[in-house]
């Protein structure tokens, strides 16, 4: 099979639907031809000139990044600035760029799940399920083969699908109802139309009162038994993320329930405390946000790059397993712009 950019784009969109992105974000295929063939892929967190040069050296036709190269509308593309140089080089060398950012933050097994797994947490659940992504669909039709309709709904990931006869109507009308995530609605509707099920029927979509279990922000999990001591947990975070130091505030004698959010997730601090977390691991915490106003609660800033970089290997692994004919590499470049100096004369916590 000739793997094309669109095949990988579709795979990533099934994992992290672009509809999940936050309003300011820019995700999907940002540069390149969706019909272009791909034999080698480079996965990274940030798209820098060094990463593009690495892709060139490895003869990669596609870069898959977490952070988008293009956030805002651009008025020109030329080598006079860094962003222009990168885009110019990508286009000249036929390298496509696909980004999955806040949509991957909100996806099941996305950024925060990967971070939680690296910390060895069990029983993982979304911390914040405030994504009104689920829709209720209702199809009324004369179609006689009810099982065929249910099978088609299930194919497009409709859940809790069922049907009932419509009383007081001729021609044996049936009403089919199900729950489906919004990004699958149009695909299902097109398939129903193709099968002729909409010619003599109606298709309605309405909002659900309860959110989907498939999407959210942040993750909460736990350690078995009585958990671990605070110092041991701090050491575990450093070891898992390969850092020499982390910033933290508060304290908790034993760490059992832990909330995490890869990247800038301090907005979830109150939800972490309300969920009974003994510790919350995230990044980009401002000074006044370190005040927790709660006893027995540990707040850790593990670094933006450090808390998100594990997802690079997760993406690499998922693509390698889904496309066995592809060579998929994780970048060897360290794109973290932030440096930390740890003095050898004083290694005490400050």
Image (cartoon, grey):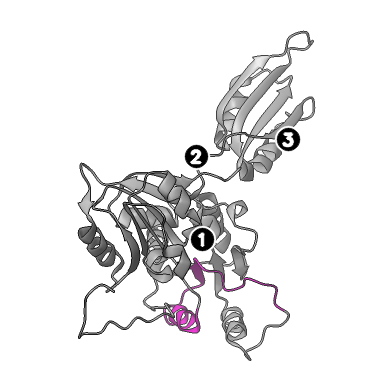
Q: Helix, strand, or loop for circle 2?
A: loop
Q: Is residue 50 magenta?
A: yes
> Which of pointers 2 and 3 lies earlier in the amino acid sequence?
3
> Bounds of the magenta span?
48-74
Label disc, if present, on residue 193 of the rendered structure: 3
Q: How dense is the environment of label 3, judged by Cα within 10 Å: few (below 14), some, or many (20 and up)?
A: few
Of badges 2 and 3, the one in the foreground is 2
Q: How dense is the environment of label 2, judged by Cα within 10 Å: few (below 14), some, or many (20 and up)?
A: some
Q: Is residue 62 left or right of residue 275?
A: right
- Which quadrant does the C terminus fall into? bottom left
Count every numbered label the image shows and give the total: 3
Pointer 2: what residue?
213
Q: Alpha carbon of mark 2 to alpha carbon of mark 1: how far?
A: 31 Å
Nearer to the camera, 33 or 240? 240
Quadrant hosting residue 177: top right
Q: Is residue 15 magenta?
A: no
Quadrant hosting residue 186: top right
Expressed as whole percent of the image width and height from the top left, the position of residue 183 reads 62, 45
Expressed as whole percent of the image width and height from the top left, the position of residue 115 reads 36, 58
Label disc, if present, on residue 3 of the rendered structure: 1
Q: Is residue 183 left or right of residue 257?
A: right
């Amino acid at each position: 099979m000739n793997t094309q950019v669109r095949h990988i784009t579709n795979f990533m969109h099934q994992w992290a639907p672009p509809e999940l992105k936050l309003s300011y974000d820019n995700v999907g295929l940002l540069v390149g031809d969706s019909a272009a063939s791909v034999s080698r892929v480079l996965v990274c967190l940030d798209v820098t000139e060094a990463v593009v040069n690495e892709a060139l050296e490895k003869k990669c036709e596609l870069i898959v990044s977490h952070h988008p190269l293009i956030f805002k509308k651009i008025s020109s593309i030329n080598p006079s600035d860094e962003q222009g140089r990168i885009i110019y080089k990508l286009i000249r060398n036929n390298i496509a760029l696909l980004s999955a950012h806040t949509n991957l933050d909100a996806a099941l097994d996305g950024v925060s799940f990967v971070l939680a797994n690296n910390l060895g947490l069990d029983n993982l659940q979304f911390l914040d399920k405030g994504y009104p992504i689920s829709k209720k669909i209702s199809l009324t039709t004369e179609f006689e083969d009810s099982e065929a309709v249910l099978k088609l709904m299930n194919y497009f990931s409709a859940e809790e699908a069922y049907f009932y006869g419509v009383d007081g109507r001729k021609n044996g009308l049936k009403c089919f109802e199900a729950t489906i995530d919004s990004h699958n609605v149009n695909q299902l509707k097109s398939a129903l139309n193709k099968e002729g099920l909409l010619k003599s029927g109606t298709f309605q979509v309405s909002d659900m009162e309860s959110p989907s279990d498939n999407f959210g922000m942040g993750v909460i999990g736990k350690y078995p038994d009585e958990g671990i001591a605070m110092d041991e947990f701090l050491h575990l975070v450093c070891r898992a993320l390969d850092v020499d130091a982390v910033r933290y505030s508060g304290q908790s004698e034993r760490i059992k329930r832990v909330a995490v959010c890869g990247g800038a997730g301090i907005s979830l601090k109150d939800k972490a405390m309300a969920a009974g977390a003994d510790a919350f691991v995230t990044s980009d915490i401002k000074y006044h946000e370190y005040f927790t106003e709660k006893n027995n609660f540990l707040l850790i800033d593990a670094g933006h790059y450090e808390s998100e970089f594990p997802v690079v290997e997760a993406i690499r692994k998922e693509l390698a397993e889904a496309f066995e004919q592809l060579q998929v590499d994780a970048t060897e470049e360290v794109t973290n712009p932030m440096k930390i100096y740890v003095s050898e004369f004083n290694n005490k916590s400050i």
